[in-house]
Image (cartoon, helix red, strand yellow):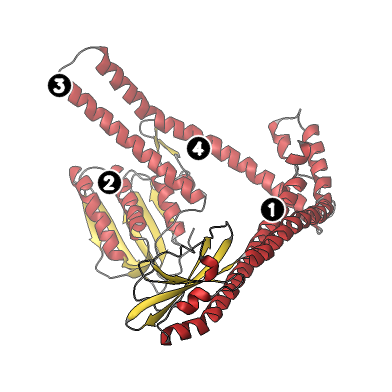
Amino acid sequence: MMAARSLRFRMMTLFCGVVGVLLAGSYLGFYELVRHQVHQQLDRQLVEASEPLIADLETDRDLGDVRQLNLPNQFFEVVRPSGQVLARSANLTSQPLDSGPFQPGLTQPVFRTLRGGDGRRLRLALIPFRRGAEGLALAVAVPTRASDRVLATLRSMGFLILPLSLLVTAMVSGWYVGKSLAPVAALTERVAETTERLTGGDSGDLWRPLPVPAPLDELGRLAGAFNRLFEKIHSVVGQMRQFVSDAAHELRTPLSILQGETELVLSEARGPEEYRKALEVIEEELKKLNRIVESLFTLAIADAGQLRLAREPLYLNEVLEEACSMATPLARAKGIVIERGLQQEVAGWGDEIALRQIFFIFLDNAVKYSPASSHIRVRLTASDATAQAEFEDEGIGIAAEHLPHIFERFYRVAQVENNDTRSGGLGLAIAQALARAHGGHVQCRSQRGVGSVFMVSLPLGPNFTKP
């Protein structure tokens, strides 16, 4: 079991497996090539054996010559397209070839492998010729015993050579992998000793750096890589814990509402109107849950580096105009006016759906946190290599101490007026991830009680950074 779990065993097994597949593939390819050549050689022999007889049949209408043939290991039949035998050689009197019908108008030889009446395998060629106005075929067959013996010998050699090759490969790879992994094994022992020594300490001790006696050699670089990995893991684990806590907090509210509405509906019989209202509440909360889950999925893909964006030419001003049109009903419900400064055409490259999502996130935030009857100003400018979209609102603004954190997931901004908190959700984090995937970035400047300006900078060239 220990050997089966060791890296040495797995590497040796992988190496032997790859070599075995290559050897088997090479042998099968070689075997198929030899088999093809053997069959081609037999087919050439059949055609050569038939040439003088066909020349005679095409000039002499008598089939007696075929009936008199009695060559060892060569069999002949003259057949019609329907399969009817007109004449066969003397050595086929008791065991016909049963060559079968063929396509009328046949112009090229047809080759088949069949089994004769005595159980022997035969290679047969149907060679068309014309006897007067009638199209016939000469069936010529020879036993394949010699070629089958050659192929059987080749198969036996393969079954012997392949296991021996794998055995030698396993021995060589085991020795080489063991020697190569010796320094890694030594470092593993030191890591295990350090882990055992720190088991009783606090969590901070678990991230104590490994000693690096020789930082310039392979072991030193490996130890340094372990230290950087430990530091990164410590940071990522903390972020994951906070993220899970925040996600659970965000999901708790809609789930509590769903549970409460469901329990209320099931507690006693109610009228259709009450059921309808309850279902409307449930639908709204399910939409919230769906948005949260989709956002989490988008961020997970972005974190994994698997976010796939299209690279297509487009006009950024048109994409931004579409996002403004999507946000207009939301703004109109609060009496907010979206002022557009999109007269300039800005050509660029990118994923139209992703860019529209970025712009809509900032517009939706501006509408959400702006007072009624205010204005939102949208501007688009371009330089030689960069386009910048700005979203300016007259909302509540963001305090300076919160600005560095607003693009963090579920970051909660304290409200001074009511001593409450509001979650930043996932929208800004998604916008930042999509902008970075396009090779751009997002910035914000804000002042409490005055408003905020979010700026999205995007490269205009086609070579944006792909995730």
Kindly identify which numbered label has been placed on residue 243: 4
Q: Residues within 10 Å of mark 3 (few under 14, many from 20)?
A: few
Q: Nearer the viewer, residue 32 or 6?
A: 32
Amino acid at circle 1: Gly
Residue 16 shown left or right of residue 341 in the figure = right
Q: Residue 116 location in percent, x, y?
A: 54, 60
| In this rendering, the label closer to the viewer, 1 or 3 | 1
| In this rendering, the label closer to the viewer, 3 or 4 | 3
Q: CA distance from mark 3 to mark 4?
A: 41 Å
Identify whether 12 is placed above or below 46. Answer: above
Identify whether 290 is placed above or below 389. Answer: above
* Marks 1 and 3, the one that precedes in the sequence: 1
* Marks 4 and 2, the one that precedes in the sequence: 4
Corner quadrant of residue 32: bottom right
Amino acid at circle 2: Val
Corner quadrant of residue 261: top left
* Element carrying mark 1: helix
Give the tally of numbered discs.
Answer: 4
Residue beneath the point at 44% across and 57% down: 308
In the rendered image, which quarter contains the N terminus? top right
Amino acid at circle 4: Phe
* Element carrying mark 3: helix
Q: Which residue is mark 3?
A: 272
Q: Is residue 271 visible?
A: yes
Kindly identify which numbered label has been placed on residue 367: 2
* Marks 2 and 1, the one that precedes in the sequence: 1
* Element carrying mark 4: helix
Residue 281 shown left or right of residue 203 in the figure = left
Q: Which residue is mark 1?
A: 17
Q: Residues within 10 Å of mark 1 (few under 14, many from 20)?
A: some
